[in-house]
Amino acid sequence: MRVLHGSVAGWTGAALMALGLSAGCGDDSDDPQGSGQETTGAGGGASGAGGGAAGATSGADGTTSSGGATSGAGGAASGSGASSSSGATSGAGGAASSSGATSGAGGATSGAGAGGGDQESTGFSVRGRFLYDRCGEKVLLRGVNEMVVWLSSGPDGLPEFAEIAKTGANAVRIVWLATESAAGLDQAITNALAQKLIPIVELHDATGKWDLLPSLVDYWTRADVVAVIKKHEQSLLVNIGNEVGDQVDNAAWEAGYKQAITRMRGAGITVPLVIDASKWGQNIDQLQAVGPALVKHDPNILLSVHMWWTDGSAATITRELQESVALNLPLMVGEFAQHAVYECGKHPFDYKALLARSVELEVGWLAWSWGAVKNSDCQSDGPFDMTTNGTFAGLTGWGREVAVTDPNSIQNTSVRPRSIETGSCR
């Protein structure tokens, strides 16, 4: 999703979709879904519900101006200082494994017991289409997104992580920026883990902007950032970038992410990498077409679709999930809410069907968004905030159903792996 952050205004990709625009949640760009030409209205700045760069307003030509928008090489330190894991050797796919373990032809991280048994591996790993923790326990993600980097109290996730944890969620997707410090990143991850939430950190700087993907990798491969990832590698997932790119052809998308994965593995990052679809996160057809090639390159990845579709019917949701499962894709739903962004309530999203199908097909999901940082999207026609004030007691409407009351809600289907709940495999 995107957000114009002076007033924390968020526009999701759906809003742009109906015009043939392709925006998604958490975007900071103002390009609508579909055709790649985002309409922003007279004021010039539409943002996606995923939150874009703070204070950025975008103009009719799609460029961002003023307000301190962070994006591009200027916001990320170069990767020249990237550190590699001690003794790790990388496989043909370029992925490095930790603690001296060698990786296979696909470059996926390997470790004793990964994906089965009681023996511990170095952290989470992906086998086939499923995520496993370091103890070999299958994990189906059930959680929420939160724009942590823009919390009024500071980007540490407090007290919001504690409120999110009351739902029984096992994961939280943390909106982050490449302008933030490694120390701040460490604190946010530490605070999420203290609440027994799997942290999934994503960089929001390149939302909708394909050419900025390398700048995100520059941040992830900085020596101080790699050190933080290594510190938490037993319990962490890294979402390379939020909704990077609008209209990106399959060949470019595949090549760009192969290079990003290889650079990050070469820097010693062994955790599962989450990769958003293009078209503001919505292009599930691209995930289905090109995803298998990325999985072959590095099996330790998850592919994330953001369901800001103008057709959010149960039939469409079911068909796309079934097609992905048939391809054995490691698919997760990274963002969704009660309707699209474009024209809001005119394009309802059947989130109850998503919850039900996700149980049947064993697909993980994260709802957008908790609401301690307000979305600007659809404020007069069904805002995306799950809560009124960022607290569990403040859950309302669709947010309460997704978190608590639906038979397939977070509270009714989320399971925290033992390694997160107790810190042990036993």
Image (cartoon, rainbow, N blue to C red):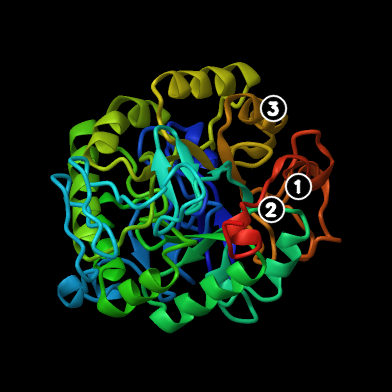
Mark 2 element type: loop
Going from the N terminus, do you reach mark 2 or mark 3 first?
2
| Residue found at x 51% / y 54% | 26
Residue 197 visible, this angle: no
Q: Label 2, on which residue?
A: 169
Residue type at numbered disc 2: Ala
Res 403 label:
1
Q: Quadrant of residue 137?
A: top right
Mark 2, other Cα within 10 Å: few <14 / some 14–19 / many ≥20: many
Residue 411 screen position, x and y as percent? 77, 46
Residue closest to the eye, 65 or 258: 258
Residue 169 visible somewhere in the drawing: yes
Q: Quadrant of the C terminus?
A: bottom right
Q: Position of residue 274 (x, y in %)?
A: 40, 49
Residue bearing mark 3:
356
Q: In what element is the residue under mark 3?
A: helix
Q: Nearer the viewer, residue 107 or 402?
A: 107
Crowding near the residue tagged with mark 3, few <14, some 14–19, many ≥20 C-alpha atoms within 10 Å = some
